[in-house]
Image (cartoon, rainbow, N blue to C red):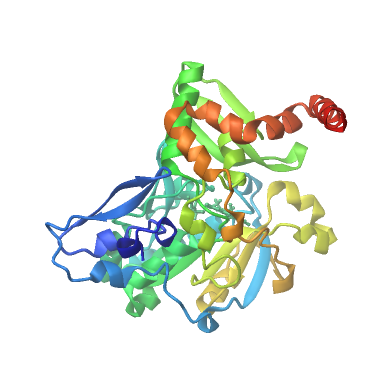
Amino acid sequence: MFLDSHIYSECCGCGACADICPVRAISFDHIHNGFTYPQIDYKRCIKCNKCRKICAFTKDYNYDNYFSDRVFYGWVIDRDERMRSTSGGAFYSIAKAFLSKYDNYGACIYGAAWSDPYTVSHIGISEISGLDDLRRSKYIQSSTIHIFEAIKKEIDDRKKVLFSGTPCQIAELYEFLGSRYEEQLLTVDLVCNGVASPIVFKDYIKSLEQKRGNKIVSYSFRNKMPSKNSLKYIEIIYENGKRTFTETDLFYICYQNRLLHRESCFICPYTEFNHLSDITIGDFWHIEEKIESIKDQRPFGISMMLCNTKKGIDCVTELTDIHISEATLDMIDFGEVLNESLRPSKMDEFYMNYKKKKLINELFVYVGFKEILSKRHPYLYSRYRRLRDLINRG
Ligand SMILES: Cc1cc2nc3c(=O)[nH]c(=O)nc-3n(C[C@H](O)[C@H](O)[C@H](O)COP(=O)(O)OP(=O)(O)OC[C@H]3O[C@@H](n4cnc5c(N)ncnc54)[C@H](O)[C@@H]3O)c2cc1C
């Protein structure tokens, strides 16, 4: 465990150790590759060891009890709501149904929201109007520090809570609450291909602002462009009203190349069916190749809802504002499953240089040239490749 070993891959950064500490001796001030890690103030520490016991990331679970059962694909019927979601809008539909069903219990939903154009943190909301803040994937790591404590309080007050987040955040929440809260909690996690560095992201936004001489008011990952059959446009809005809309944003390309991932993502135990949540949501990639009649739905996003518990199945099958059908587990495509061999060899060099240089230049050097040229200027890229082949052949 990180608190003893100081091996970065052994900490997923959830903050449970800081939350459980009775004397607040743990802070998340240690930084590595733009991610925060726990640090114990031994002058305060009373050696109760609660921080070590709570850490679930490197624990071995018996997944037999947690195996996924049924899977559904679908999309919210309202086209506007669907367009405003990353995938088919499953999260919005589940969250809205939860708030309506448990209105009398003071229901609340916890999920990831932008705190400002540079930072993502988990927040709690209790009105349907608040759902918009939680909606959409933000691929940088969301801070959950002190959130588990807040959820415990809501549950102690007999409220119903829906928590949504990455699979490691869900595992830590269960560890923090213990099983006695089963009845009051619904958990929704994501098919997660890793989180990107929040501090590198902040530096990236600042360097764009410097380059353009204008402040950024919003950055959003994964917008839909149905006319181009794409779900992966990045939108950046500046204070002066200027807007960029591109598939070739340097930060996003680096994220997709896993250069900005947290070290723990490369040993993540929750990459396929072994999720601890009630429901796992994601994009149902390639389902339209198996069910041809839904091909025209792809450009608008198709959600996957993998039900891991009976509570999850009951919730998904009761949804009314979503077009939903059952699929089979073998139709799921998790993509390239993260493991240590996928940690980019360039990562250490990247961070070493990143500390010294301007970030945009650094990102450009590492992934920019070939990917950006091939996407933005395919003709020039083919000429470049031909020239390179000729040079290689002498
Ligand atoms: C870091 C990350 C990696 C992902 N990787 C994959 C993948 O490889 N394959 C795949 O099929 N799907 C992946 N997803 C999920 C996918 O992008 C969609 O979020 C998912 O399909 C839900 O879409 P939606 O339309 O139902 O809801 P949306 O409206 O997109 O709902 C977003 C939900 O995600 C939560 N969320 C957003 N950002 C974060 C964050 N940084 N940390 C924790 N929770 C967050 C919100 O709280 C909300 O519950 C990933 C999501 C994230 C955040």
Q: Which of the 4 image quarters holds residue 252?
A: top right
Rendering coords of residue 219 (x, y %): 51, 34
Which of 14/93 is in front?
14
- Identify the residue shown where x is 73% and y is 46%: 299
Vertical position of residue 266 compared to residue 60: above or below: above
Identify whether 123 is placed above or below 67: above
For the view shown, which residue lies furthest in the top direction?
213
Q: Position of residue 160 (x, y in %)?
A: 37, 68
Query: Residue at the front extreme?
Result: 394
Quadrant in the picture for residue 376: top right
Left or right: 155, with 374 as reference point: left
Residue drawn at x 29%, y 66% is 152
In the rendered image, which quarter contains the C terminus?
top right
Task: Please state, as top left, top right, bottom left or bottom right, where the N terminus lies in the image.
Answer: bottom left
Determine if residue 340 is in view: yes
Q: Position of residue 177 (x, y in %)?
A: 32, 72
Q: Is residue 259 above or below residue 355?
A: below
Residue 233, how many percent across, how many down? 64, 37
Residue nearest the viewer, comparing 147 with 227: 147
Q: Nearer the viewer, residue 82 or 150?
A: 150
In the picture provided, is 74 more to the left or to the right than 135? right
Residue 106 visible in the snapshot = no
Number of numbered discs: 0
Q: Residue at x 51, y 63 (%)?
A: 268
